[in-house]
Amino acid sequence: MRRSLAIVVTFALGFTACDTPEDENYLWLLSLPNAGTGEGTEDLPVHVEVDDVAGDPDFLFDSTRDIQVFINVIDPRAPVAGSRVTIYELDENGNPVNTISFRAVTNENGNVGGTLTIDRTTNLVELAVTYQDAVHRMLIDVRFVQEIRRTLNILALRQPILVADRDSDGVPDQDDSFPDDPDRATTVYCPADGSAYTVAYEDLYPNRGDADFNDYVLRVRYELDLNAQGEVARIRGHYQHIARGAAYRHTLHLTLPGVSNAHLDWTRFDAAGQLLSQGNSEIADFTAIEMMPDSSTTIEQSNTSKTGQFRPGQALSFEVTLGAPILRSQLGPLPFDLFIHVLNTGHDVHFLGRYANVDGSDRFLDSAGFPWALMVPQNWRWPYEKENIHNGYGFFKDWYESRGTASADWFSKPDDRYVVPAF
């Protein structure tokens, strides 16, 4: 369900919008202290139009969600090109989780469009818009927001300032993660704190599994390099095989929709971090690319038994240089289309929301309304073999029956009797 929230907020009381430089209000605004001088960052008068789209986002047993971002910046004369739009994911105390979750500069029409990916446990983000040397900040409660749509009407001109920008991409060197590369400007970490997600598969598709979600388990993290327009230019990833509670064998594959003519560099390590192999290739169509080989060769033990010492498996680090930048939305939700191919059955196992049956139903939702794949925040402790996830996590049922609105931290409250120890 979607609904629009239309709100108008004016900062600096008594200010009114101006249509042209000849407007008497415009002349009055320029007479204010610091207006048009390029000095100070606290006195920027801004009239904000809020037209966020609210509603309950689709729930696909996902631990993250994507929010579309549309920002427009206008000063008293025209749309503003080159204003920086930055979004920070905040923790429960209102502090930035890491560095930046999204950044782009406005185009010649004063617009920025892009995608923000946040954890479902995140309630608050900060939107910061820079106009010349002034920054206007807004806190946004995103619990029921599907699109952030805002127009900032700057009510007083500030004198243009000169900034160092060696690669001429519109992002000042001091804010540019790649000041000498015009194709990249910002790195976004997934998850935002730089840790990892846990990705777990059931491998009996199309038959229902036993819901222990330990047949094939990975630690996964990504880094996305965005250009100045907020598009994805490069993708780095790290996968580590950490459990295999199944008799079946699998290979791991990745599809990146919309990515073509890409260059892939990869390095594979053993459990101790020693180099096993490395290589690179040119990929015309990034569909179903094998990322890790036969699972019987990538981990030595199941790590799902109540006895025995935990021993992780092999790891893969890779970088994809895209032939052309693409919108973040084209890649789909995390962990992108990362799937296993079950060698014994010939079937692939995908996350929800990517493939549909003829009748429109999700191809990877089983008869009990359950997925065959989960992505869980942090170093999740998966259930022991033959122990149902409901036993290991008492709040899991509350979470999915509420469509993610209740017990969002279910994964942090395990029952030690039914899940593997912390490693």
Image: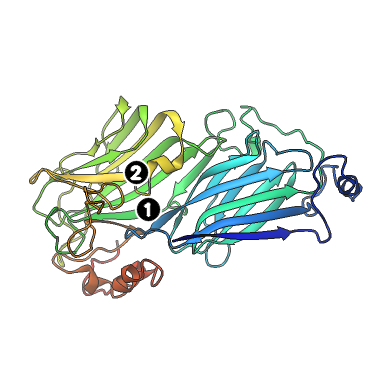
Residue 111, image quadrant: top right
Q: Residue at x 64, y 42 (%)?
A: 84
How dense is the environment of label 2, judged by Cα within 10 Å: few (below 14), some, or many (20 and up)?
A: some
What residue is disc 2 on? 238
Mark 2 belongs to which amino acid? Answer: His
Picture coordinates of residue 399, whole percent (x, y): 34, 70
Q: Residues within 10 Å of mark 1 (few under 14, many from 20)?
A: many
Q: Which residue is mark 1?
A: 196
Image quadrant containing the N terminus: bottom left
Q: What amino acid type is highlighted by mark number 1?
A: Ala
Q: Compute the Cα span from label 2 to label 1.
A: 9 Å
Q: Disc number at residue 79?
A: none
Towards the viewer: 175 or 137: 137
Residue 163 appears at what percent x and percent y? 72, 34
Question: For the view shown, which residue lies furthest in the front direction?
Answer: 359
Query: Where 389 falls versus 68 (above or below)?
Result: below
